[in-house]
Amino acid sequence: MATTTETYEQFLEHVRQLHYVSDAGSVLQWDQQVMMPSGGTPARAKQSSALSTLHHDLLTDDQLGEWLDELDGADLDAEQAAVVREVRRDHERAVRVPSDLVERISEASSNALPVWEEAKAEDDFEMFADTLEEMVELRREYAAAIDPDRDPYEVLFEEYEPYLGVDTAEQVLTTLRDALVPLVDDIADSDATLADPFEGTYDDDTQQALVEDALDTLGYDWDHGRLDTAPHPFSTGTQFDARVTTRFKPDDPIDAVGSTVHEFGHATYTLGLPREAYGTPLGDNRDLSVHESQSRFWENHIGRTEAFWDHFADTANGHLGTDATPREFYEAANTVHPDNLIRVEADELTYHMHIVLRFEIERDLIRGDLAVEDVPAVWNEKMEEYLGVRPETDAAGCLQDIHWTNGAIGYFPTYTLGSVLAAQLDHHLRADVGDVDALVREGDFDPIHDWLTENVHRHGARYETDDLVREATGEPFTADHFLDYADAKYRDLYDS
């Protein structure tokens, strides 16, 4: 009979194969969104489906279940026990899902991407409606396979944030909605006018050089990453290869800087994961709330600070041909636009109303309380209720996001959970490190990287989310720091 050590080593090698297959699939997805010719979709759908099926088969393998049973209650150290915990959770969910359903979801997701792209380009939701209906039905079927007796949206939410719970997400979203709507109303009534130093348009090459310098400034590791453009910016990869994408708006180069810094935050988390643990949960991220906390930290608590623009203004002026002061760049980066329709272009405050809207719609879709055909109307009504603006087109409304295309239903709340955690981490970073603004003003980002690596990145998925938050900050997950930060910052900016 194998010893515990032998069993664990066999188990761990199987787990590594799981991760390698998953990472290969991520590279194919990156390629489809960034470089693949449009005609490659039929073959890519089959390739992605095959890898998804292989991953599912490895995850549901009977031998893996036997190893997990043998290791249950065995004399394991804390890190080994964490690996077993994470794999057991994934295994137990996966064994309930038929392989053919996994294959159908993967193939449908690949096929959905060009349908969504065309529907968005044509501003025609009806072109995408049947595809969305299929994705909703497939995700309902997926949730029912895992646990037919639970709320299907709760089951899907746990794909992206397994430990904080959908109740926590709903509570945070409600708290922020109740606090931020009055703050945004006060800002709208303010007589303050923030600076807008940009005139005319800025070509892609100019903005590309600008954001490359931003990445250099923050310390992006080009030996283990690359920058490309994509219709919907994202980051993907491993601690050896973490890639970022961005996009350019001709009349708003600040948008490209913010988008790039956001994706840099994702990438620097990925690159900060322990390399020696690659292929195991100890070398994997702690799900999407924590991942999003890293991108929102760098985007908002570094890239949107006056200290950052004190350091970066001369570089930005050099690229853009502007003559803006650091304060003017700072104000431009933090201007609140309640009438903005696009989530990824939203300011730091109204952004969360975009998340509330999507959360409520996708939750009701999955629960069967909203028909797909009614999504555009409900979307527009909620935009008017929460932000006082109504989209005139589907492209600027319910077709703007890619997430439902790939079946990522339950994903959106993690954006707000991550923003809340980013403020909590920022609060404790500043308490531990000292004058963070002085470091940023001097372009010395190493102490910030070191603190985040020590308190977040190096742990991988060793801790459950709430335990990781306590480990990093000494307190439970809370929205208090975000609310204090947002109120102080924006009332100062708008004299409100």
Image (tube, grey):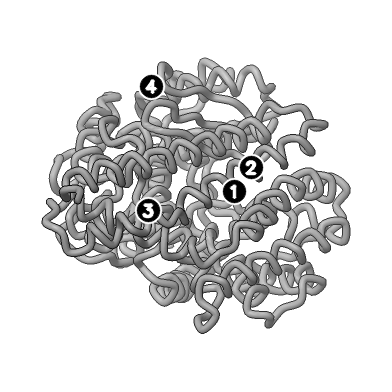
Amino acid type, callout 2: Ala
Q: Residue at 64% across / 70% down in the picture? A: 141
Q: Amino acid at mark 3?
A: Leu
Indicate which label's residue lies in the foreground, 1 or 4. 1
Q: Residue furthest front?
A: 1
Q: Which residue is mark 4?
A: 221
User: How far separated are the C-alphas under marks 1 and 4?
Assistant: 33 Å
Q: Within 10 angstroms of label 3, few (less than 14), some, or many (20 or more) residues?
A: many
Residue 488 visible, this angle: no
- Could you tell me if residue 176 is visible in this image? yes
* Secondary structure at numbered mark 2: helix
| Neighbourhood count class around disc 2 (C-alpha, 10 Å): few under 14, some 14–19, many 20 upward | some
Question: Could you tell me residue 446's position as x and y percent?
Answer: 24, 28
Check disc 1 and give the amino acid type.
Answer: Thr
- Callout 3 touching callout 2 (CB < 8 Å): no
Q: CA distance from mark 2 to mark 4?
A: 32 Å
Provide the residue designation for mark 2: 50
Location of the C terminus by quadrant is: bottom left
Give me the disc on residue 496.
none
Kindly report the distance in space between the C-alpha atoms of the residues bearing marks 1 and 2: 5 Å
Mark 1 touching mark 4, by CB under 8 A?
no
234 above or below 183?
A: above
Question: Which dot, 2 or 4, sits closer to the camera?
Answer: 2
Q: Which residue does the numbered mark 1 point to in the structure image?
A: 53
Q: Residues within 10 Å of mark 4 (few under 14, many from 20)?
A: some
Q: Earlier in the sequence, mark 4 or mark 3?
A: 3
Q: Nearer the viewer, residue 247 or 225?
A: 225
Residue bearing mark 3: 64
Q: Residue at the location (75% across, 70% down)?
A: 375
In space, the residues marked 1 and 3 are separated at their CA atoms by 16 Å
Q: Nearer the viewer, residue 195 or 144?
A: 144
